[in-house]
Image (cartoon, coloured by chain):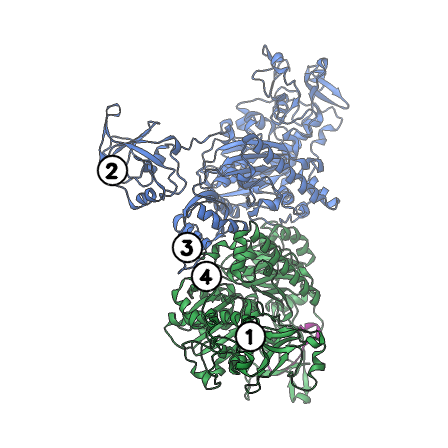
Chain colours: A blue, B green
Amino acid sequence: MTTEPNTDPLVIFTPSGQRGHFAKGTSILDAARQLGVDLDSVCGGRGICSKCQVTPSFGDFPKHGLTVSEEALSEWNAVEERYRHKRGLIHGRRLGCQAKVEGDVIIDVPPESQVHKQVVRKAADSRVIEMDPATKLVVVEVEEPDMHAPTGDFERLKDALREQWQIERVEADLNILTRLQPTLRKGKWQVSLAMHICHAGGPSRILDIWPGVAEQGLYGLAIDLGSTTIAAHLCDLSDGAVMASSGAMNPQIRFGEDLMSRVSYAMMNPGGDQEMTKAVREALNGLIADLIKETDIPPERLYEAVIVCNPVMHHLLMGIDPVELGQAPFALATSDSLSLQASDLDLLAMAPRARVYALPCIAGHVGADAAAVALAESPQSSSDLALMVDVGTNAEILLGDRDGVLACSSPTGPAFEGAQISSGQRAAPGAIERIEIDPVTKEPRFRIIGVNMWSDEAGFETAAAATGISGICGSGIIEAVAEMRIAGLLDPTGLIGSAEATGTSRCIPDGRTHSYVIWDGSADGGPVITVTQGDIRAIQLAKSALYAGARLLMDQRGVDKVDRVVLAGAFGAHISPKHAMVLGMIPDVPLDKVQSAGNAAGTGARIALCNLGARAEIERVVREITKVETAVEPKFQDHFVAANAIPHASDPFPELSQVVTLPDVNYNTGGGDSAEGGRRRRRRKA
Amino acid sequence: MTTEPNTDPLVIFTPSGQRGHFAKGTSILDAARQLGVDLDSVCGGRGICSKCQVTPSFGDFPKHGLTVSEEALSEWNAVEERYRHKRGLIHGRRLGCQAKVEGDVIIDVPPESQVHKQVVRKAADSRVIEMDPATKLVVVEVEEPDMHAPTGDFERLKDALREQWQIERVEADLNILTRLQPTLRKGKWQVSLAMHICHAGGPSRILDIWPGVAEQGLYGLAIDLGSTTIAAHLCDLSDGAVMASSGAMNPQIRFGEDLMSRVSYAMMNPGGDQEMTKAVREALNGLIADLIKETDIPPERLYEAVIVCNPVMHHLLMGIDPVELGQAPFALATSDSLSLQASDLDLLAMAPRARVYALPCIAGHVGADAAAVALAESPQSSSDLALMVDVGTNAEILLGDRDGVLACSSPTGPAFEGAQISSGQRAAPGAIERIEIDPVTKEPRFRIIGVNMWSDEAGFETAAAATGISGICGSGIIEAVAEMRIAGLLDPTGLIGSAEATGTSRCIPDGRTHSYVIWDGSADGGPVITVTQGDIRAIQLAKSALYAGARLLMDQRGVDKVDRVVLAGAFGAHISPKHAMVLGMIPDVPLDKVQSAGNAAGTGARIALCNLGARAEIERVVREITKVETAVEPKFQDHFVAANAIPHASDPFPELSQVVTLPDVNYNTGGGDSAEGGRRRRRRKA
């Protein structure tokens, strides 16, 4: 296709009106695809499926300024003649894959040749993925049996897949073989197959079979299995569209909030690992059931799931006791990608032969979720040095560019997800997600999820009445702590000042420490939402772990600064870069160099679901990543202690200081509390 | 090893006394293997398993006329030192795989290094098979995990298999992965694996895993699934020894005695194919249970089964409706070999991950059983032209030599197996298996299975009392009919003469025809055993089909005679060549050129069980065999009709006439019965 004045024939598609010039000999299907015209095809342009039928118009078309000659399209070729002879074709119709452009032409795409694909894309999922899914629908024409060359029907089907689709080494289980002969005969030797292609040289598998050209779509799941939350996307495997997304809390939380407490649970309780395996598999089945209900897509059309998760979740999902991940040398039972049957994981609300692909783990503490971030964000292709942080209960950190990528994980704990925070809650309507504190009056104003105005704006209370003001979510607590530091309510060591010291009655005594009151709903029977000294300590531990992990990778790389920071994770998109930097969560960079990648792990899962080559690519990248084990690096401890101060005890933040000036306050009253922040709690046994 | 006077060092093994000269540098293990000394090893001579420990003796040994110097064996190498350091070694012991011959030496094999393998070989199973089974025990040493190169334990196990056993592309299901980490640690990074190796480039699979060097053996099953009988052999996969054999009637007989009546049953009765599938799978489970009971080998040590059968049995076993095999073009659902899980076939009395290998089918009517005969008898390697006939309810016929092999099947019906015969029975104690009729007196004498004398010998009646004389088995009926023809009781058209015409009162009237009385046990309440005119007709139909199939292949090959005939099948070993030729079952060849191959299909199954290369070989041979479809060849009909006469209406039998002179009798009394023999019954719809 060329857009400048062109002597190549002009092709105009109706009813869309899309048009372009194409070299003679271009097929109508190729022209449609290059223009993005909605023209179906499921046989790979082999003149088999007839999904691409079009009606060319000939004669004068003054409206388009075009005269279409009878020679505007190529003559009927053998494939097209064969199709018409064998299956019939409405008069005036051509097969778009066979008819080729020879002159200016107008092509009508009849409604039945349009896909009308519903494109439901959530904001976080707007990435365009090149579609080449492992699981796809293929239509083949199979040779009829010949008594004198008596190969089996299955062998001739395999020949057809090799010749018509270049799919080698095909396997089918007995349940397919039992259906093969009647299906071939019902389809008059034309069948549609749900194929699962192996990217690693293994056999490709027939997952399902239908006579003729199947009408049904194939669907897949991209699942991001986090320590605290699980997210699943149901995708159309023909175009990658996200049909629905659903999320749930990881039910394993009842066995331990962070990963290491779950490993401990497995070590202390015989059969504990199996309890947790059962819980997470049930949760996945529940999520899938939700998606099925929401979309009305039946379970038997779900042919594949791609799962990303950290190593402990990976092992617990697979039914592997994670005990070795709790002690040095943190040996994974298996680190390569896994290709399984869905039934191996008790995922029963899927097609009988549905497959599961689990991305490879990078190391004992750096999982398939980090691999998925690498797949989504491609640090290995970055021209500048990028630090990528997937914020969750366990943070995955990648640092790299074209010269190499380093990876580690850091046990931040669930504070960033609103857990272990006195007024913490999930990001749901009613949760405070943004907050500002006036540096002079020390009065807060805030926004809650579900209400599109600030709390000091007229009408807020009415608008908030539906949900109430229920707590603080992860991004809210980060802003709250950072705003308290900017407003001088908090000193660099993380101590909250008293009402006397700070000059606001919102700082109220709370045992030997103080809390800051953001919202008092008690008059209406609602909660009193405060930030306590304990909340500050939890955030300090989390952000110190995150910063220390990043710093460790920078040491290994031999750099003091990075060019850009990418925040990923379920709530990565919602973190305010300024506040994250005031807190000292991330190294100092210009604020406009802090990017949000949304749920990069989930996006990586979707990419692997929709593109076969991406699986080979990430398996290669994972082998080349330099793994850093934070748990046994003495420097991690030093970095952790230094990072406890807000923003940092020793590292300068020159870029931040151009934007924000932090007050020099000190609320250490000699009670020894300030030393507390220097103590560290590790969640791993080294 | 050399046997003539030799300057190479002499190695004498005790306690066996086996001795031989070996070139310097030969390992003790290699020397033992070449001599057939019982010295164990399961690690492939890698100094890992220590099964091959030996005790060299040094000094003067006048008894052996030998002085053994301290330098008679090579010095300790790194592998041996490493083993001693890591696992310990009794003082004076060496590892046979590492210690090398440097001078004359005496080597004692301690009892624990001897395998003491029980070699149970049935007569029909005496063939020596080179052991390289698909399923075998391997011992590996796995690298310990390293935090700084954090690959999974499974990936390091795969590395070990690649490096130590050259096994590439290994897969393990989740049930193995869940056991991997504790097993590796319990075995101190040494584990034994039951490996299933794929010969076709597919992945190899871990079927089981144990810490250290496993003590248990691996066993497999070779199953010959016939239309009428099923035979199974339980084999030790380390040395191929047949530990037990068992047989049973195919319970599908109740749905139809021959294959085409079973296909009809499936066509006429919805769900009939599934009934038959269930019946045959249950029968296999019963046979396996018998073998387990007989050998005390637990089911979880049965890791593989190899199955050979004809196409209809193949499809019914796999759960595939055989309807297409009942009508032209007789399309197989699948013709290639199948590699399955035992659980796919509901074979539950085996190891959880046990595998099944089904040999390839040659054509719609020529099955994996014929492929197994080809594997056992190698027509493709024969220097003379061999006709191989596997006699059963369906006869598989191969004709060929190095220049090419042809194959067909012929629907003989179950008469040769004693079914459809008035006094027919299975080959069991009490059954008449051999018979002679005096040409002058027309009196018979016979032998029964279980009694080692003829019926006219003194003491026979006493000896036969235990079992009684119960009927005639397949080889007995062939001899009976042939002897009746030799004795002039039967004319060439197959008519039995009357008492008057034959001169013996043993020819009694039976409706409009006559029967010959072999044994009248009615005085003692036993059966009257006769050969009826109906029996003769059944045998004529069966032998005509067999001969016509052979003749058809000879036509295709362009020959009038073959160099030798191989009779195979469950009772092939028991057929008398002379009688088979009098009957005209097989083409005329010198009697000493009729060989018995025993149960060649069963032997083929055992070869495929014990030798991986044989699977690739037979898959290649099957592709190259020329398939001939008897059901649609007009010449088959002509051959069938001409072969109805005994021995034949037109083909001369010059070799036979040198041995036997057949009387020229004619019992056609004008009643038209002789024409009956010319009618043919086909069991297939063409």
Residue A452 sits in quarter: top right
The residue wearing badge 4 is B363
Chain of the residue that carries numbered disc 1 in the rendered image: B
The residue wearing badge 2 is A102
Front disc: 2 or 1: 1
Q: Are marks 3 and 1 on the same chain?
A: no
Earlier sequence position, callout 4 versus callout 1: 4
**Relative side of A67 to A470, left or right:** left
Front disc: 2 or 4: 4
Q: Quadrant of the C terminus of chain A?
A: top right
Distance from disc 3 to disc 2, alpha carbons, whole Å, reads 39 Å
Q: Which mark is residue A145?
A: 3
Part of the protein shown in magenta: B102-121
Q: Amino acid at mark 2?
A: Glu
As for residue B117 lying within the magenta part, the answer is yes
Asked whether disc 3 touches disc 4, contact meaning CB atoms under 8 Å apart, the reply is no
**Local crowd size for mark 1, using a 10 Å CA cut-off: few (<14), some (14–19), many (≥20):** many
Q: Which mark is residue B514?
A: 1
Distance from disc 2 to disc 1, alpha carbons, whole Å, reads 86 Å
As for residue A272 lying within the magenta part, the answer is no
Q: Residue at x 27, y 40 (%)?
A: A25
> Can see residue B119?
no
Asked whether disc 3 touches disc 2, contact meaning CB atoms under 8 Å apart, the reply is no
